[in-house]
Image (cartoon, helix red, strand yellow):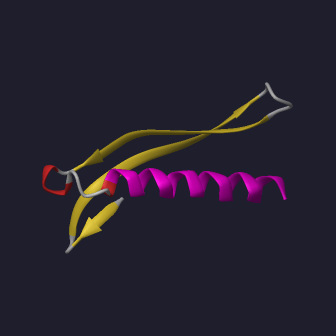
């Protein structure tokens, strides 16, 4: 979730799913990235996706270490 001055301006969903191909592992799916109309064109969606990618890397690393 992205907030600015107590207003939610962006949301997304990240789901971690185990799968059996590739020697078993985890897949992160990023979806539902939404920004408020007042925040569009300001890079909020890009930052949400960057955060989700980093979160996925950290979670998978934690699960396998």
Which of these two is toward me, 65 or 40? 40
**Corner quadrant of residue 13:** top left
Which of these two is toward me, 29 or 46? 46
**Corner quadrant of residue 63:** bottom right
Q: Is residue 18 left or right of residue 30?
A: right
Q: Residue furthest top?
A: 21
Instruction: Indicate the quadrant containing the N terminus: top left, top right, bottom left or bottom right.
Output: bottom left
Q: Is residue 38 left or right of residue 20?
A: left
Which of these two is toward me, 61 or 40? 40
Which portion, as a residue range, is magenta? 45-65
Instruction: Indicate the quadrant containing the C terminus: top left, top right, bottom left or bottom right.
Output: bottom right
Q: Is residue 36 magenta?
A: no
Residue under the image location 72 percent in, 51 percent down: 60
Residue under the image location 79 percent in, 26 percent down: 20
Percent coordinates x, y for residue 14 in the rendering: 50, 45
Q: Is residue 13 left or right of residue 42?
A: right
Q: Residue furthest left?
A: 38
């Amino acid at each position: 979730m992205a907030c600015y001055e107590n207003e939610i301006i962006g949301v997304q969903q990240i789901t971690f799913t185990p799968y059996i191909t590739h020697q078993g592992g985890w897949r992160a799916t990023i979806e539902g990235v939404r920004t408020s109309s007042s925040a569009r064109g300001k890079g909020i969606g890009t930052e949400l996706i960057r955060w989700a990618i980093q979160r996925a890397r950290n979670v998978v690393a934690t699960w396998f270490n």
